[in-house]
Image (spheres, rainbow, N blue to C red):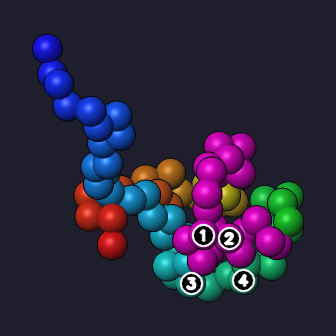
Amino acid sequence: MNNSKSIITIKEYGRINICLKKLIESRNISRNYLAKAANTRFEVIDKWYNDNVEKLDLDVLARICYVLDCSPDEIIKYNRESK
């Protein structure tokens, strides 16, 4: 039996990054265009563009992929290091 009294263990799991900025710039389109074409608010696209997404909305991701003709792995990247 483990007698350790610590209940919480903190581990670094890495970070998920949203790489929409590079993709949009390579397609030479604006965030405003993408928001309209994906039928979502500019503020939502702006958060994705600035890698400031707290929770992934898979419907938004699907619409972005449809408009940009790309796959989710071109937008979402996993980095083992959190920094």
The numbered mark at residue 25 is: 3
Do the CB atoms of the residues marked 3 and 2 lie less than 8 Å apart? no
Q: CA distance from mark 1 to mark 3?
A: 17 Å
The amino acid type, in three-letter code, at marker 3 is: Glu
The answer to whether residue 39 is above or below residue 23 is: above
Residue 41 placement (x, y as % from top left): 85, 65
Task: Name the residue furthest left.
Answer: 1
Left or right for 48, reference 5: right
Disc 2 or 1, which lies upstream in sequence?
Answer: 2
Q: CA distance from mark 4 to mark 1?
A: 18 Å
- Which residue position holds label 4? 30
At x 33%, y 72%, the residue is 83
Disc 4 or 1, which lies upstream in sequence?
Answer: 4
Magenta region = 42-62
Q: Main secondary structure of the magenta part?
A: helix
Do the CB atoms of the residues marked 2 and 1 lie less than 8 Å apart? yes
The answer to whether residue 28 is above or below residue 46 is: below
- Which residue position holds label 2? 47
Disc 1 or 3, which lies upstream in sequence?
Answer: 3
State the SS at label 1.
loop
State the SS at label 2.
helix
The numbered mark at residue 52 is: 1
Do the CB atoms of the residues marked 1 and 3 lie less than 8 Å apart? no
Residue 49 placement (x, y as % from top left): 62, 74
State the SS at label 3.
helix
State the SS at label 4.
loop
Left or right for 79, reference 21: left
At x 45%, y 64%, the residue is 17
